[in-house]
Image (cartoon, rainbow, N blue to C red):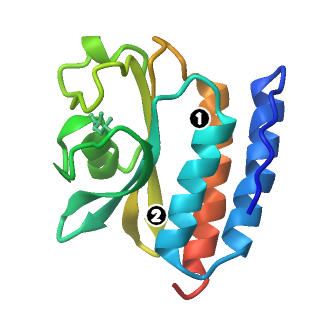
Amino acid sequence: MDIPYRAFDTKEETYAYLLTQARAVLAETDETVSALANLSSALYLLLPRLNWAGFYLMKDGALILGPFQGKPAVSRIALGSGVCGTAAQLGEAQVVQDVHACPNHIACDLASRSEIVLPIRRGDGLFGVLDIDSPEKGRFDEKDLAGLSDVVRTLEMWLGDAR
Ligand code: SME
C-alpha cells in the first residue's frame, strides 16, 4: 500500500494526516503483526527527525521487541526498566527531552537524544508501548503527545475489535 510522503508546516497538520494513514493501515488487515509493522512504517515515514519508531509488547510480565523501523534494539525490557519499562509500569506516557540526562534510559542507538513512549491498553490490561526516538534534543512536546495519543487510541480501538 502506498503512503504518500507529505511535509507539513505544523505538527497539528502532520498528525491529522498521520491519523488518516494510520486508520487506512489498520482498516486493511486483521493481523496484529501486520498492523504494527505498517503503523511503525507510517510513523517513521511521516514524522520528521526520527531515528527509531516501533512497538514493545507485553509478554510474560515483560516487554518484548515488536515491529519497528530503525536500528536493531534490545529485545526484552523488564517492567520499570528504561523509559519503555517505566511507561509500562506506571501506565503513563513518558517524554524525555534529553536521554543523556536520564539515568534510566536504555541506549539502543547512540544517536538518540530524545524519546516519547506511550502505553497501549487492551481491555483492562497493557498490550504494550509505542516508542519513538529522535536524534534531536527536545524533539517531542505536548503536541506530539496529543497527536500520538490519537494514534494509540485508534490502535486500541482496533485491538479491541475481538483481536
Ligand atoms: N530507549 C528505550 C529502549 C528502547 S530503544 O530506544 C529502541 C528505553 O530506555 O526504554
Residue at horizontal 53 percent and vertical 70 percent from the top: 34
Badge number at residue 145: 1
Question: Decide: marks 1, 2 in contact (CB < 8 A)?
Answer: no
Q: Secondary structure at mark 1?
A: helix
Above or below: residue 54 compared with residue 22: above
Above or below: residue 98 compared with residue 96: above
147 or 64, nearer to the observer: 64
Residue 37 in percent (x, y) is at 51, 60
42 sits to left or right of 94: right
Amino acid at the residue labelled 2? Arg
Q: Which residue is mark 2?
A: 121
80 sits to left or right of 21: left
Above or below: residue 29 compared with residue 64: below
Residue 128 in percent (x, y) is at 38, 59
Q: Is residue 130 visible?
A: no
Crowding around mark 1 (Cα neighbors within 10 Å: few <14, some 14 to 19, many 20+) is some
